[in-house]
Amino acid sequence: MALLHGIINVDKPTGITSMDVVRHVKRASNQERIGHGGTLDPMATGVIPICLGQATRMMEYLVSGSKQYKAQITFGVETTTYDKLGEIIQTKKVKQITYKDLLDITDRFIGEIEQIPPMFSALKYKGKRLYELARKGITVKRESRKVKISNISILQWDPPNLNVEITCGKGFYVRSFAHDLGQLLECGGYLSELARTKNGVFTIEDAIPLIEVEKRLLSNTVKSILKPIDFAIKHMPMAIVDYHTEDMILKGQSVSHDAKVFDSNAGHNCRVYGTDGTFLAIMSYESELNQWKPNRVFSLR
């Protein structure tokens, strides 16, 4: 099979890690340059964009995009991992919680908030992954981080289970949200189900089950589900450049704004194409120098 360059919208099954998904795709495609655009916990299902070939250079744009989740939070129990995979460390009686109580408390999380990551996470502390320390029974102080939540909708309240839909930015831990919600309600809580339904422009409606992706890779029929490299950045303004400017960009050279093919008012980033429609680069505008600088250059011809 020829080397593939593009993004596959995979529907991750429960019980495996994001890196497991990457390994499955590597084996089926027989190519090494593969990565994912946003970690999902083993218990979680749903959208995980898998980047192949030169598309791996787009992963930072996938990770930084908006995410949407459907989650079930179970109150009355606390676990070591803040989800159903952890050991139960405490149980409490769930008091009478009204729908209004839930609305009032979830509203506190809307906007930009400070969130403390869970101990069972891949973040590093003095060179060690936090989950490695947690498995040894070691707890360290974690600094809170700014995260953004655009919306929290209550889908169902069937005590002790709360089903919500969350739209958020990068770095938000739904497990920590479940734990924090339980603390505020003074009954404890953990994440019992989680599905990512959206990651940037990738949605669960268009996601392909991992087993189907593997079949298509092995049968060399994957191109119909392979999104182009620039699929995730279609929201950026675009520019089409002539052959001379294309040559400069492919050499990593900046281009003067006076070339009049870029719009400095369109935003900080711009996607650039050759006259034949080939995707060339992502460029950023430097107002002090009145020029566009290549951030990512692609050789797709």
Image (tube, rainbow, N blue to C red):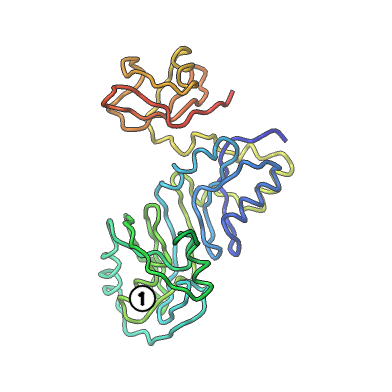
Q: Which residue lies furthest to the top in this view?
A: 244
Residue depicted at x 29% and y 25%: 264
Give the residue displayed 35% in from the left and 71% down from the top.
Answer: 180
Q: Residues within 10 Å of mark 1 (few under 14, many from 20)?
A: many
Quadrant in the picture for the C terminus: top right
User: Residue 119: x and y, percent?
Assistant: 44, 68
Between residue 273 and residue 137, name the one nearer to us.
137
Outermost residue, bottom side: 93
Is 68 left, or right, of 51 in this rendering? left
Q: In this view, does 83 lie to the left or right of 31?
A: left
Give x and y (percent) for residue 238.
40, 27
Name the residue at the front extreme: 126
Residue 295, by quadrant, is top left
Q: Is mark 1 on a helix, strand or loop?
A: helix
Residue of label 1: 182
Q: In this view, does 252 lie to the left or right of 185?
A: right
Image coordinates of residue 223 in percent, x first then y, are: 64, 36
**Camera-nearest residue between 54 and 74:** 54
In the figure, 94 relative to 285: above or below? Answer: below
Pick the residue in front: 76 or 183.
Answer: 183
* Front residue of 222 and 297: 297
Q: Against 32, is 175 above or below? A: below
Residue 97, position in %: x, y?
31, 80
* Image quadrant containing the N terminus: top right
- Three-letter code, disc 1: Gly
Left or right of residue 185: residue 239: right
